[in-house]
Amino acid sequence: MKETISASQIGDLALHLLAKAVVEIPAQYLGLMEAACLRESNPLARIHLQAMLDAARVAKEEKRPVCQDTGITFFQMKIGGKIKIAGDWTHALHLATAKATGIVPLRPNIVHPLSRKNQGTNCGWGLPYIHYDHVADVDYVEITAIPYGGGGAGQTAFVEIPRIGPKVKPLMKGILKTIIDAKAACPPMVVGVCIGGSKDLAVRVATQAVFRRPTGAANSDPEARAMEAELLDLANRLNIGPLALGGDTSVLALHLELRGCHTAAIPCAVAFNCWPMRIASARIYPDGRVEEVVYPPHPKISGEGKCPEK
Amino acid sequence: MPRKITLTPPITEAQARELTCGDIVFLNGTVFAWRDRASERMITLADRGEKIPFELEGSVHWHCGPIVQQTPSGWAVSSAGPTGSMRFSAVEGRAIQDFGVRLIVGKSGMSAEVRAALRSKGAAFLAAIGGGGSLYAKQILHVRQIDWLDLGLPEAFYTLEMRDFGPLLVAMDSHGESLYEKLRLQEKLEELWAEIDDRRSVGEIDWDR
């Protein structure tokens, strides 16, 4: 007999994670911001990075959402193959989203696309957005709550390249162009890229790549790793900078994924997140134990949101 | 060091013209916060020749849809920061020309049409920190009024009383300057493209593949 996790346990944890994600930017991520601040040679960009770190600190201390745009609620789930879930867990995630909207509160962003009717719950018409993976060998459910801000989410784009001829250079150029075009997304940004797949898969994988953790960790595939390192370096020479007002850090991290694709096609999708990385993950086990999934900041970095003195 | 300037709305033409790109502004007093749906309503009213029911002469616009909550002592704002301003270029071009709006607070810049309006009427665009919602919410002394609630909470028209609202960076001024234009991003992109063209490989990847 498989052990059981209830839908209501999943809902309770989802509510907790959503409430946490909007006010607390992960320390590991703040570490990347601090490192960017230390590296920055443009004085105005340094002031902006410091203000962002201040905003993150105040948000955590006072439990104020760091950004007023608490976005579209996106849940990524890992469902262990060794357990079973009693009850309707997707419904539990809907209830958690509606509850968080009332008590955190979140900004009620979700409307009908045509009538613009707002139910005030951040739910409805197929939202929240839930993606789940089945992971055969584990005995937990892992929930990742992502309040995905409209500024970043709205910039998702395809890179179109000629189907006849070389692929690598046109992709590199096209991805850089896409990053410039996304500069309104509150840089420094996190960029997710998927090369390959079907077009719909490319968008989903690029989006999930944005939220790959720990942020900035390299892909284990050597080709993907080489390309993401190169793209990150090139992107940070664009001088977009914090708030698109110039500086050495335009992109804090770039995660690239490769997927198989049809012989006739090479889809490429690019997705973005703004600097406030809102994300929180935890695992729940059948005995009710909850384990938050956290990543430590770089050992030389405080992770407390302080721009180091030069 | 940049100049620090504190202003209290209504803003005069002379005060707006005094601002130059790179100045840091703090505001005390009334600021109007609104976004997409309210901008549509303003355009509709203006097109019909009806009066927009707010005193726009010398006013400050903030492109922002805050997180608000009703409390026993009134509306409370937990987070309020700028939303992207480019999409409001048409409405602000008109608001500056026809209704005397003097300062626009937002992010990521506005169109050439707005730049021209800033110049001809004497007004400025101030960049706030995107994602700085926790900081700016603390500068809201109180929510004086919320209008157009029928548009939905994020889309309503907010009249806010601010204290030391800032730092706001003058990013487009009345002298035709724009900090965004100075970055020459397109030229940078083309330089990097040329560099990519000259490359042969990176890591294990043949770039001509």
Image (cartoon, rainbow, N blue to C red):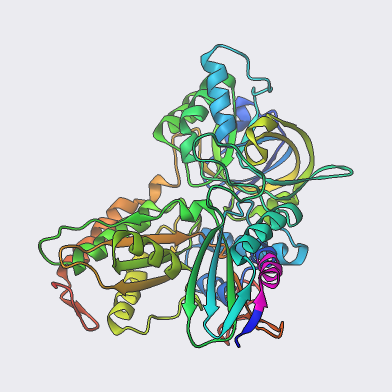
Q: Number of marks in the image?
A: 0
Q: Residue at point 36% right, 65% down?
A: A235
Q: Is residue B197 left or right of residue B74?
A: left
Q: Is residue B84 above or below residue A19?
A: above
Q: Is residue A106 left or right of residue A146?
A: right
Q: Position of residue B180 (x, y in %)?
A: 43, 47
Point out the residue furthest to the top here. B49
Residue B157 in the magenta stretch? The answer is no
* Magenta span of residues: A5-17
Please tell me which residue lies in front, B172 or B87.
B87
Q: Residue at point 59% right, 55% down?
A: B131
Q: Position of residue B69 (x, y in %)?
A: 77, 46
Point out the residue furthest to the left here. A165
Q: Position of residue A262 (x, y in %)?
A: 20, 67
Q: Residue at point 72% right, 58% down?
A: A64
- Quadrant location of residue A89? bottom right
Asked if residue A175 can be seen in this view, the reply is no
Image quadrant where one finds the N terminus of chain A = bottom right
Please tell me which residue lies in front, A276 or B31.
A276
Please tell me which residue lies in front, A43 or A236.
A236
Q: Is residue B169 above or below residue B39?
A: below
Q: Is residue B208 left or right of residue A111?
A: left
Point out the residue furthest to the right here. B72
Q: Position of residue B27 (x, y in %)?
A: 70, 41
Secondary structure predominantly adopted by residues drawn in magenta: helix
Residue A7 in the magenta stretch? The answer is yes
Image quadrant where one finds the C terminus of chain A = bottom right
Asked if residue B131 can be seen in this view, the reply is yes
Q: Is residue B136 left or right of residue A278?
A: right
Q: Residue at point 65% right, 37% down?
A: B152
